[in-house]
Amino acid sequence: MQSRYLWIFAFCFATVSSLLFQKFLLPMLPSIHAGSGLLMNDAEYYHKSALLIAENIRAHGWSAWSIWSAQTSTVGNVAALAALYAIFPVDPALVIPVNAFLQASSAFLLLLIGRELWPGRVGNIAGLVVAVFFVVFPSSLSWYSQPLKDCYVITGMLLILYTWLKALNSLPERGGLAALLAWMWLGLLLVAFVKLYYLKLLLVVAGMTACLVAGCLLREKHPQRYRILFFYFAAVLLIAITLQIMRPLVEEHSEGYAEWTPAVIGTTQAWRWQESPWLPDTLERYLETAAKTRAGMIEHNYRVSAGSVIDAERAPQSVSEMLLYLPRALQIALFAPFPDTWLQKPSLTRLVGVCETVLWYCILPGLLLTLSYRRTLAMAVTLLFAVFFMTVFSFVTPNVGTLYRYRYACEFMLMIIAVGGWSRFFLNHPGKKGGRAPESCPVASLPAEDNNPVQHSGSKRNLISAAAMVSFLTLVGSLGFFARDLFMVRWFGAGQEMDNFFLGAMIPMFFVSVLSIPAGAAMTPVFSMLRNAADRLAQARVIASAVLFLSLLLALVSILLYFLAPYLFSVLNWHYTSEKMAAILKIMNIYLIILLLSGLVVTGNAILNIEGILVFPAVAQLVVPVVVFLALLMFGAAHGINAAAYGMLAGQVANLGLVIYALRRWGALPLFCPDISMALQKLPFYQYFILVAASLSAALFVPVANAIAANLPVGSVAIIGLGSKVVLLITGVLGIGMTTVLLPYFSSLVAKFRHHQARSDLSFFLLLVTLFSVPAALVLTVLAESVTGAVFVNSALNEVDIHNVVRVIQYGVIQLPFFTCGLVAIKFITAYQRTWIILLSSLVGLVLTVILGVFLAKLFGVGGISLAMTLSMAVSAAILVSYANYLKHLPVSDSVFIVFNWVLFITLFICLHYRVYVGAVISGSAYLLLVAGSWHAMIVHAFGGRIPLKPRSSVV
């Protein structure tokens, strides 16, 4: 994973988490919600202070703005928030992009620190794992979603430590030292921006580190020891100069609780510092301030009845007492909260802290492994930095909850060392097994032109053009059938004849979608492998066998339906008169012939697609609605609705004739008798029946939705049916276009053993459809209300019905990103003939539709059913994408890109739906950043995993 991708992922995660936490989760937790998405802590005070400063800015101009405000006794975090309030409409969510930027930068710095501490793969693993923990730990949400100081401090301290480690490992030449000092000073300013008194602590730890480095380098006679020592002592000097410049502000903001002289809890004697006769007064004054601060913090926590105070009875009053307490302070810093307190006063916040502490306990023994594997100066510097600050924070902060925030950065510094120790242990363990290899066939030698990245990009352009053309032609065909229905309604009316037509066509067309269409998907990979082989005779015999088996199956089903249709209608509790039943059966018998012919058409189209003839099958299908129109015009008056059925049959025959013509012209496949023994070995019977089962479960989505809607108020079934038709039209058009192009393409790559390109193209197409489907879905959700209102104006539908139709369409079209990604994954998985996961994802989606549909219908009415179908589609797509990632066909970074596209899309939709426009702007900005990263990854995959670069001109 590239480092820039980690930063993008962390930024998007922090943005989404903060928005959802502020705007939706916190309002549901009134016990901790202070209003406006703020927690009941310092965030509320900072918000009010920022409002006051912003009002002063509007009244007196920007001269009233200051980083360190004397009016409100606040620092940089409030100053930044006040500036945002003065420019934009007041909303605490404005701070989210700032905090997300700092949070992502901190995660990025942890990755870099891991690489500095550990060489090679161990450093990448340690840095990446710790960076992920840093971002996803729920406790950090309590400050990066709020206008607090922690994000600035954490980023600044990590940046300072990184520069110190970078100077040790690879101090660059020619200006590198100055650049490192500049970066360190930036970290110093970030810390001073919110906590000026940290400058004193940084000066102390910098001096200690410089002495440690000097002792080690001079003893070992490091070749760059003088450059490194110059850097460290320059760093100490830089901190000292900064501290001296800001000394008035530092003294003003350094007292805090130390300005009090409270009573220690549990005693009746006033706290009083006992001076030491042997310690310099300047140093003792700093120690006295620290001890007095601890005493003041104890008293403050006592007054506010804080529930996580520890060692309240320990308030050192002399240097000796302080020194004796420091080991205990370090113990608390490393291990608090202790296990004996985990079950006390259970709450959600405590549960989160306990879970994170348990994970920390599991990681911490890795420090001991590190001591045996890698005892370096960089490790010592990191340990000194982290332990020093954790000990100081633990000493002055007797509240575990507050300490949890203060030690966060230092804890993750130690975590990098520990995770590196564990990684080194498992990588070097003698029983370690090799990683899971991609599940694919052995790689054959490739022709030289296969490695041409420009040719790869050109083939993808042709595929995209073909898919767009097929989708357009499919849309034209769908509109043709829609026009047929309108024409029939205007001619015959919405009466008995139309009922007979649709009832007669329903069951045969159901079996077309369940039995015929999966046959093409199942046979395409086999046909591709046979085409790639030299034996065209074997290919022709297998194709003939496939046609025979499929025709026999469809003939058997047609015969059974012919004889059992009346009983089937009785089982479905559809009781009609004998005249109506005869009319329905007549239409049905015509459609049974169409069912029989559909197998030949599907097989022929699959062969054409394998031969690279992608657009012609879509053109040939347009003949069907044309023939139906001609049949109605010529024979409708004499034969009524039966003319439409015979027109469908004639159109199917004409379609089949065009397919056969194309096969004879372009396919050049001679006709041979079937070879049963070869067919039993080559034909994918197992894959076919798995796909049939998956198609059957997918076909049940609409009946399930109608069944749930039947329990809602009258008209709900019609509303869900009307809205679903729009969604099915969109997904159907896209689905056919993508299926026609992608399945033959992936099957061809697999047949040629070009697995690297297949995996690269999978990533490319997943990222491509994600990038285009998200904005398309958002546009459709915005247009749904106005377009639906215009279509149904002056109709019999009332305002409530139109509103429900709009909700069904809006909740349905947001499945486009999930549907398109799932479809790409299905075609790739089908090409590798691992169809069982397709069935599993379909069944999971069906079960979730039932469960969520019943639940959401009670909350959102008929729109909840559409939302349930979308959520089930998201889960099904996630299963398919995860499976591709599990087989190592899809890189982890691309999977994360796809997931974050989905998450940001959902967040943006929620913000728009509930009119949280500030959140929509923030999430939209994060989405644009993610699009930039996704586009870069997609371009890399477009050229077969490498971008061709122009050769640089030589410089003389």
Image (cartoon, helix red, strand yellow):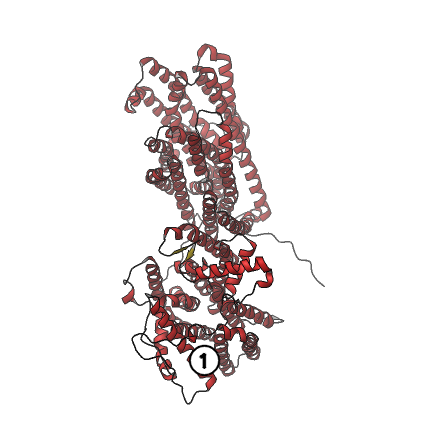
Of the pair 726 and 146, the residue shown nearer to us: 146
The percent position of residue 271, horizontal first and vertical second, equals: 36, 79
The percent position of residue 151, horizontal first and vertical second, equals: 47, 63
Residue positioned 47% across, 57% down in the render: 10
Relative to 721, is 310 above or below?
A: below
The percent position of residue 629, horizontal first and vertical second, equals: 51, 18
Q: Is residue 236 left or right of residue 428?
A: right
- Total numbered badges shown on the rendered structure: 1
Residue positioned 48% across, 79% down in the render: 208
Element marked by disc 1: helix
Q: Is residue 426 left or right of residue 49?
A: left
Question: Which class describes the residues within 10 Å of circle 1: few (<14), some (14-19), or many (20+)?
Answer: few
Res. 286 in view: yes
Res. 535 in view: no
Q: Label 1 is placed on what type of residue?
A: Tyr
Of the pair 837 and 578, the residue shown nearer to us: 578
Q: Is residue 231 left or right of residue 649?
A: right
Residue 677 occupies quadrant: top left
In the displayed image of the protein, which residue is found farthest to the top?
Answer: 638
The residue at which mark 1 appears reads as: 286
